[in-house]
Amino acid sequence: MNPFELANPDRFERFARPIALPVSVLAAALIGVGLYFALFNSPPDYQQGETVRIMYVHVPAAWMALMCYTALAVSSAVGFIWKHPLADVAARSTAPIGAVFTAVALVTGSLWGKPMWGAWWAWDARLTSVLILFFLYLGYMTVWAAIEDKARAARLAAIVAIVGFVNVPIIKFSVDWWNSLHQPASVLRADGATIDSAMLTPLLLMGAGYMTLFAALLIASMRNEIAARRLSRLDAAAERPISTVRVE
Amino acid sequence: MSAFLAIVRRDLALAFRAGGGALQSMTFFALAALIFALAIGPEPALLQGFAAPVLWAVALFAAVVSLDRLFQADFEDGSLDTMIETAEFLELQVLAKALAHWLTAGLPVIAATPAIALLFNLPPEGYAPLLASLLVGTPALSLFGAIGAAVGLGLRRASIPMAILSAPLYAPTLIFGVNAAQAGASGSPEYAPSLLLLGAISLFSALLGPIAGAAAIRLNMS
């Protein structure tokens, strides 16, 4: 199927409605099985002990944090260049999901850091760049929140998303450089060892589960947004002042 | 080119005659540095270590708080409309306004830096690298800030959203700026590369800032 056919909201709805439930079920199943492997059916790490299990929640969340921002930037660019309203809807819906994945990565990383490094937070290069990524998400959502006119908000937010995306490599590079001055990398190289297949299975399952969860949430959020826009258009068409509605 | 210079001259005249622009930025810079000094305490060795980081952070704040000066007044009185209509390249106008912003918010801060650094007990060999890093790096603050200011035109109560939008973009500038200043003071070999990288960021912002800023202004004015 030509992906551009989906740019029509009606076609998107026809495509999304039947798959919404199966995708959600698949996400729940993958995450369920992944969690089972992660919590019960995988070995504890010989150095980290049981805390290694946090990794199965943490690492896929960090993957998703980056993937969602990429998706956000790509759909923003598509929306900006070809003025596809559906791409704007997709970008807007992606942002909060990505922000939550980023927050999950930060929080679980912090929970893992306390027993492993002895501190909730370390200004490790990777942590710092993910924190900045989180603020990029917040900045993007601020634009949507502050502008009422949806069409203008979409295009301004797209500029913000693209500018942020262009800067991600620079931020990453600068933070790597910054950290190398202040902290010996040896302490933070705990995850450097090659990973065993018993640990890889739950990790990949969780990764696939998060990906499907993202798809399910995105579909739900986009359908929701499209419906909300239709509703507001219907309201506008009815041309009833809000005050008379309240009096009724 | 003459339009470019005209805008720079006009913005400078406006800043110096009406708002006391340069003096305001300098005063803000000095006061913010004073607040840091009061918070850190009078211990000379401690202050000395904080000199470059604090002065860089405060220079960044001085740029952020003056961002709304960049386009807001012209947006309100309609001169931005005229600029869009007459401009061959709006990007160049944005570059001119960012340059004017740097001349009134960046350069005064740099001029005040030696005096403030003295209060922070900066050793003599630290002055040249600190000033060099500010000179090379602060243009990026105005140029990245132009993006935030241009996007902020469409927002109500824009100053906080503008800061949220610009801050992540400022991170690399701040990191390499402080790094260059400190490496230069301690004679470390990292001085030259971080100064060069800082220059690269400024050049990059001179490309990205006008393009993204002009796109956002066009959107906000349409």
Image (tube, coloured by chain):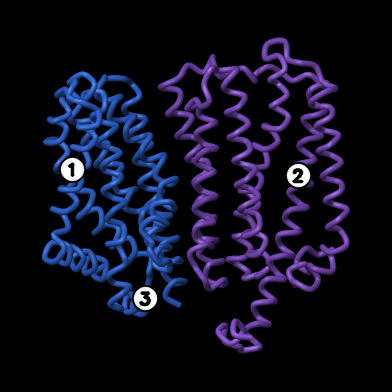
Foreground mark, 2 or 3, reads 2
Q: Residues within 10 Å of mark 3 (few under 14, many from 20)?
A: some
Dot 3 corresponds to which residue? B84
User: Nearer the viewer's eye, disc 2 or disc 1?
Assistant: 1
- Label 2: element kind: helix
What quarter of the picture does the C terminus of chain A occupy? bottom right
Describe the element under mark 3 as helix, strand or loop: helix
Of all chains, the one bearing label 2 is A
Q: Residue B66: x and y, percent?
A: 27, 56
Q: Residues within 10 Å of mark 1 (few under 14, many from 20)?
A: some
Return the residue at label 1: B31
Can you tell which quarter of the image residue A42 is in?
Answer: top right
Note whether B200 is above or below A227 in the view shown: above
Name the amino acid type tagged 1: Leu
Residue type beneath disc 3? Ile
Pointer 2: what residue? A211
Find chain B in the image and tell me its colour. Answer: blue
Q: Nearer the viewer, residue B189 or A153?
A: A153
